[in-house]
């Protein structure tokens, strides 16, 4: 039976409604999937950027911590250097005071004579030569002459060797020297310096570790005692 126009129109409307429904559902499905993928991608990008930001600030924090340690180390080293400088200055001041007080040694002529005897005897045993020249301060000539005789006699007795010691009466120790003597052999090619200043320098170098311990205590970080 042939359908009339109304029925055909109705079927067409029904089919169009069905297609439209299918299209809407498909569009909603696509939108939902797109939204899901968008949220996933957004979450991935956010997490990626979050990790980058965290890594950036972790590096920055590490750099700041490193700079802090370097600064602390530098400040500590500077403080240590200042302490060492103050200590060395204190020791130098102490040695300088000792040099100044060398003048007191020669005031007691009796004690000074014994010191000269020891310095002369030491020089004789160091040189071990037959002919030796002695130089001293101009105002010490008589005292040195007396002690030369005693030192030579003691040297000959101990070594059974002859020794002729001449006092230099033309050249004397400079004004910067407090006292003591210089001894020469082989036409002044060999020299022994036994001035009070030279003995103080020698003793200060030898006693420097002990002086440090007395003044500042034992340093646990010091490896060498010199």
Image: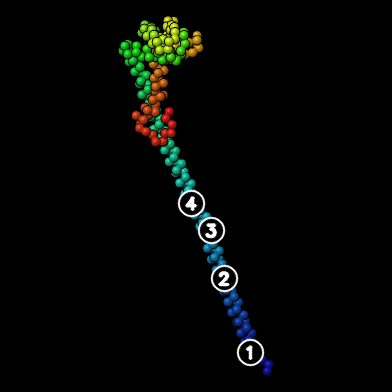
The label on residue 33 is 2
Q: Residues within 10 Å of mark 4 (few under 14, many from 20)?
A: few
Please tell me which of labels 4 and 3 falls first in the chain: 3
- Residue situated in front as seen by the camera: 100 or 41: 100
SS for callout 1:
helix
Residue at 51% over, 53% down: 55
Give the alpha-carbon distance from disc 3 to disc 2, as whole Å: 22 Å
Q: Position of residue 92 (x, y in %)?
A: 39, 24
Res. 173 visible in picture: no
Residue at 46% over, 13% down: 127
Mark closer to the observer (3, 1): 3
Picture quarter containing residue 116? top left
Q: Position of residue 186 (x, y in %)?
A: 50, 10
Q: Residues within 10 Å of mark 3 (few under 14, many from 20)?
A: few
Please tell me which of labels 1 and 2 falls first in the chain: 1
Residue at 42% over, 6% down: 167
The label on residue 196 is none
Residue at 38% over, 25% down: 207
Mark closer to the observer (3, 2): 3
Mark closer to the observer (4, 2): 4
Quadrant location of the C terminus in the rendered image: top left
Give the alpha-carbon distance from disc 1 to disc 4, as whole Å: 75 Å
Q: Residue pushed farthest bottom?
A: 1
Q: Position of residue 205 (x, y in %)?
A: 41, 24
- The residue pinned by badge 4 equals 58
The label on residue 7 is 1
């Amino acid at each position: 039976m042939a359908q009339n126009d109304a029925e055909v129109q109705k079927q067409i409307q029904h089919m169009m409604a069905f297609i439209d429904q299918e299209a809407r559902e498909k569009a909603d499905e696509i939108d939902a999937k797109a939204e899901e993928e968008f949220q996933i991608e957004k979450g991935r990008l956010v997490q990626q950027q979050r990790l980058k930001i965290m890594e950036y600030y972790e590096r920055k924090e590490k750099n700041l911590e490193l700079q802090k340690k370097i600064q602390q180390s530098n400040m500590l080293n500077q403080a240590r250097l200042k302490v060492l400088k103050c200590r060395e200055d204190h020791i130098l001041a102490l040695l300088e005071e000792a040099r100044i007080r060398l003048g007191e040694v020669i005031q007691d002529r009796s004690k000074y004579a014994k010191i000269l005897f020891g310095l002369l005897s030491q020089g004789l045993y160091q040189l071990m030569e037959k002919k030796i020249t002695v130089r001293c301060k101009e105002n010490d000539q008589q005292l040195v002459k007396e002690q030369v005789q005693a030192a030579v006699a003691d040297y000959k007795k101990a070594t059974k060797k002859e020794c002729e010691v001449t006092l230099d009466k033309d050249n004397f120790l400079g004004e910067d020297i407090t006292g003591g003597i210089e001894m020469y052999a082989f036409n002044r090619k060999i020299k022994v310096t036994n001035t009070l200043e030279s003995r103080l320098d020698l003793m200060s170098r030898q006693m420097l570790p002990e002086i440090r311990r007395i003044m500042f205590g034992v340093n646990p970080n010091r490896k060498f005692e010199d």
